[in-house]
Image (cartoon, rainbow, N blue to C red):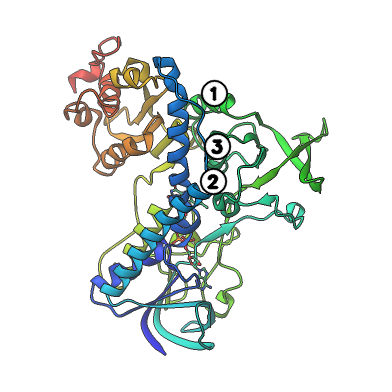
Amino acid sequence: MHAKLVVLGGGPGGYAAAFMAADLGMEVTLVEADPRLGGTCLLRGCIPSKALLHVAKVVSEAREMIDWGIEFSEPKISVDALRARKEKVIATLSGGLKQLASRRKVQVITAKAFFENSTTLRLEPTGEGGAIEKLTFDHCILATGSTPTKIPAFDIGSSRVIDSTGALELVDIPESLLVVGGGYIGLEMGSVYAELGTQVTVVELTDGLLPGADRDLVKPLHQRLNKHFKSIMLSTKVVSLVEKDNAVEVTFQDADGSNERTERFSRVLVSVGRRPTSQGIGLENTKVKIDKRGFVETDDQQRTADPHILAIGDVAGEPMLAHKASHQGKVAAEALHGGPAHFAPHAIPAVVFTDPEIAWAGLTEEQAKRENRQVEVVKYPWAASGRAQALGRTEGMTKFLIDPETDRVLGIGLVGAGAGELVAEGVLAIEMGCTARDIAESIHPHPTLSETLAFGSEAYLGIATEIYRPRSDKNNH
Ligand code: FAD
């Protein structure tokens, strides 16, 4: 078999690349080990987690209606029905991808691929029947994604110790759950289980949740999770896990090695990051270069050191996010088609879909400090937003990082209900080189949380009427 273009991996990076290439008139073969298309994001990541987080949010909002004088009885949860509904969402979307591939005449091969050299893949069928075959190609777009990081000491061969894939399977609603790792996946999954009735404990080695996010954005989330989770242990490490009497006995120590103690949990979710799928697929038989962290090195057209191979998505570097993967997929397809595409974003949004949500894009305060950059930070508290008051969710905040010389928006950060939707306006502003005045003078609908972006820009200019801020000379710009 020979293909002009092979895309290896059918996740959001791979299928975007394959579909874009087909739309540009190329003949495309897509190789994916899983019989369903969609990759980590659709099958065991973004989509199932958001489906379950939706359920968690409805449960918690129903409970909080008591503050408005409305009391619902405790929810009765059928875990089988919930799991089936989540599977239906996946099946619908995955079926849709299959149809989109077929309409574009993208040939899909269900097989595990291994590079024999720079232009040959060995294919081991993972679907029904078939024999091992060789597939030669002119070009390959590598989109093999990532898998959960494993800690050998926690690999005790117990079904009670799970990763994010296991947590999303929703085998049951355990009485207690320890989430090892305070990153976004751990907090999202912890939030789901906490709302379904599990006593959730989070343990994080560093001194804060969501390392990398600005601390002022994390604070309102931490305060709310303190109420919903049984406990959050910071600067604490897990020393060992032992399965005992239908539970996992976990030994903890403070980060400095002192204060050893044990506690039992029905299940333990190990969520300590993800590693790129660049090992075990034969890349050593090509000219592709891999960095110290296992990411495939590429240029801004996603070309690797091997002229036949491009790489996109999680396997090609941080941030490991679906929208970055699909964007790179389109760049790679266009580059192969001879187009001028480059992957050079000013802002890649990151969203933590907890309640409240946290979202940011462009420059962060932590990054500005690290790089010693002069920026002005303006914060707009949601307590001053009529919509936030009407929703009873006033803990939110919208902030901008602005270049004081040019008034250009360099970064945006949000915490609050629906922050993940609101950040998109900030992304557009950063990409378009908008100034604070551009946002302030764009009329935002009232009463919406999107107004907090306009009000924040007005606060920077000293012309905000919704809060009291002295007039600023920036108003003369
Ligand atoms: P993947 O989606 O990982 O796809 C790679 C595909 O390649 C897989 O289907 C795999 O089977 C296939 N493959 C690998 N090796 C081979 C081989 N040798 N032969 C054949 N096929 C192979 N991102 C967001 O942006 N937003 C979110 O809300 C979000 N939530 C997440 C929640 C969870 C629980 C997890 C785990 C991840 C989440 N992510 C989220 C991250 C997101 O899923 C990834 O960034 C995204 O899937 C990366 O896309 P990709 O195409 O690079 O790789």
Amino acid type, callout 1: Gln
Indicate the position of residue 266 as horizontal and vertical percent values: 71, 42
Of circles 1 and 2, the one toward us is 2
| Image position of 84 (left or right of 378) | right
Q: Is 383 placed above or below 148 here?
A: above
Of circles 3 and 1, the one toward us is 3
Name the residue that disc number 3 marks: 196
Image quadrant of residue 142? bottom left
Give me the residue at 59% from left, 76% from top. Answer: 284
Mark 3 crowd level (few <14, some 14–19, many ≥20, 10 Å Cα) = many
Name the residue that disc number 1 marks: 223
The residues tagged by marks 2 and 3 sit, at their Cα atoms, a distance apart of: 9 Å
Q: Earlier in the sequence, mark 1 or mark 2?
A: 2
Q: Is 59 placed above or below 82 here?
A: above
Amino acid type, callout 3: Leu
Residue 80 visible? The answer is yes
| Image position of 3 (left or right of 181) | left
Q: Earlier in the sequence, mark 3 or mark 1?
A: 3
**Closest to the observer: 77 or 114?**
77
